[in-house]
Image: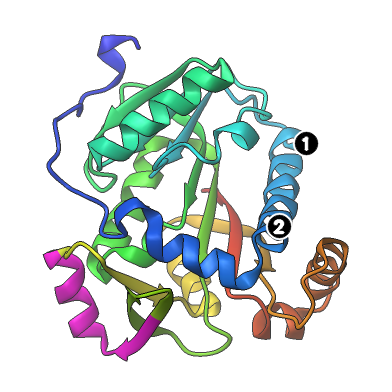
């Protein structure tokens, strides 16, 4: 990595509270692993198509909160000159490095706080997958503000978040045996527990997508597209999930009411 490009490459002691992704893996397992993957890939490929069809030249792309690098294999399909991955957890970043090596990609990895990191280049695309739902409300706003600073004018931001079918609410999630237990909590408790960052205790914010759109517009982004995905249906056949997620995203009412996750594409003004 060019040393002058990363101004904030500090050693971090932060540890992602979902140790070894045990909670996430159990949620995916209960949904159906192949169905989960197919729906996620569908919306990601729609996002990649949108980016590749855009008139901007993608020189620098940032995977913000890259974790173990699980999305590298899709993000590398975007035509770009250089790719960066940022995560605050050094142990997950080490796994991301192994993933990049396995894929044969040169990805510049940085251990830093997304709300504070500064680069000496401007990114053309930032992809942030399932980070905002696990941080305090104030931190989420600070991260979005920093994304605007990091993006080129008219640069694209791709957000993936956990969503509600109506009003926003907050969950405290933990694994007990083979089960995942979710408990609703209030906003202040959510913020407090996010800051305490206890291992094995995952905080999840279920966003009201309409409100999130308003926040993005207020912070200087123009929302271009919204996709809902991970639709709970009583069948686990992969083709059915692929068809359902396509249909859901053609009908605004279903898009709002169905799906536990959302992908949002927006442009920096």
Front residue of 17/126: it is: 17
| Mark 1 surroundings: few (<14), some (14-19) or many (≥20) residues within 10 A | few
Report the magenta residues as a range.
Answer: 181-196
Residue assigned mark 2: 34
Whether 9 is drawn above or below 247: the answer is above
Rendered residue at 33%/9% (across/down): 2
Question: Is 158 placed above or below 232 here?
Answer: above
> Can you give x and y, in whole percent of width and height, for residue 227 in the image?
68, 64
Q: Quadrant of residue 40?
A: bottom right
Determine which residue is flagged by label 1.
53
Of helix, strand and loop, which one carries label 1? helix
- Work out which quarter of the rendered image holds the N terminus and state it: top left
Left or right of 60 in this view: 237: right
**Does residue 219 appear left or right of residue 115 in this picture?**
right
Magenta highlight on residue 104: no
Disc on the earlier residue, 1 or 2: 2
Q: Is residue 80 above or below residue 124?
A: above
Query: Which one is closest to the eye, mark 1 or mark 2?
Result: 2
Position of residue 266 measured from the top left corner of the image (x, y, whole percent): 58, 53
Q: Residue at the spot x=60%, y=34% of the render?
A: 75
User: Where residue 239 appears, x then y in whole percent?
Assistant: 87, 62
Residue 10 placed where, x, y %?
Answer: 15, 30
Q: Residue furthest front?
A: 177
**Direction from residue 90 to residue 103 in the image, left or right:** right
Q: In the rendered structure, are the residues bearing label 1 and label 2 in contact, judged by CB atoms less than 8 Å apart?
A: no
Q: Residues within 10 Å of mark 2 (few under 14, many from 20)?
A: some
Q: Please tell me whether the stretch drawn in magenta is mainly helix, strand or loop.
A: helix
- Residue at position x 73%, y 45% from top? 45
């Amino acid at each position: 990595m060019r040393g002058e490009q990363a101004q904030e490459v500090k050693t971090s002691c932060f540890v992602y509270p979902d140790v070894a992704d045990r909670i996430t893996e159990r949620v995916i397992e209960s949904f159906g692993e192949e169905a989960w993957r197919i729906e996620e890939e569908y919306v990601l490929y729609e996002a990649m198509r949108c980016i590749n069809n855009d008139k901007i030249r993608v020189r620098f792309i940032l995977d913000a909160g890259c974790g173990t690098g699980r999305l590298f294999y899709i993000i590398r399909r975007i035509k770009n000159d250089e790719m960066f991955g940022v995560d605050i957890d050094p142990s997950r970043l080490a796994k991301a490095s192994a993933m990049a090596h396995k894929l044969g990609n040169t990805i510049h990895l940085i251990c830093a706080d997304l709300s504070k990191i500064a680069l000496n280049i401007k990114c053309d695309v930032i992809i942030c997958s399932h980070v905002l739902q696990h941080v305090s409300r104030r931190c989420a706003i600070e991260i979005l503000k920093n994304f605007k600073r990091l993006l080129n004018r008219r640069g694209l931001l791709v957000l993936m978040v956990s969503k509600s079918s109506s009003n926003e609410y907050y969950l405290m999630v933990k694994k007990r045996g083979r089960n995942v237990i979710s408990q609703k909590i209030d906003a202040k408790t959510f913020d407090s527990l996010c800051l305490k960052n206890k291992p094995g205790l995952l905080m999840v914010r279920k966003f009201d997508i309409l409100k999130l759109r308003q926040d993005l517009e207020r912070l200087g982004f123009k929302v271009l597209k919204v996709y809902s995905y991970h639709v709970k249906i009583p069948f686990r056949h992969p083709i059915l999930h692929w068809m359902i997620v396509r249909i859901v995203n053609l009908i605004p009412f279903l898009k709002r009411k169905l799906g536990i996750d959302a992908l949002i594409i927006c442009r920096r003004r």
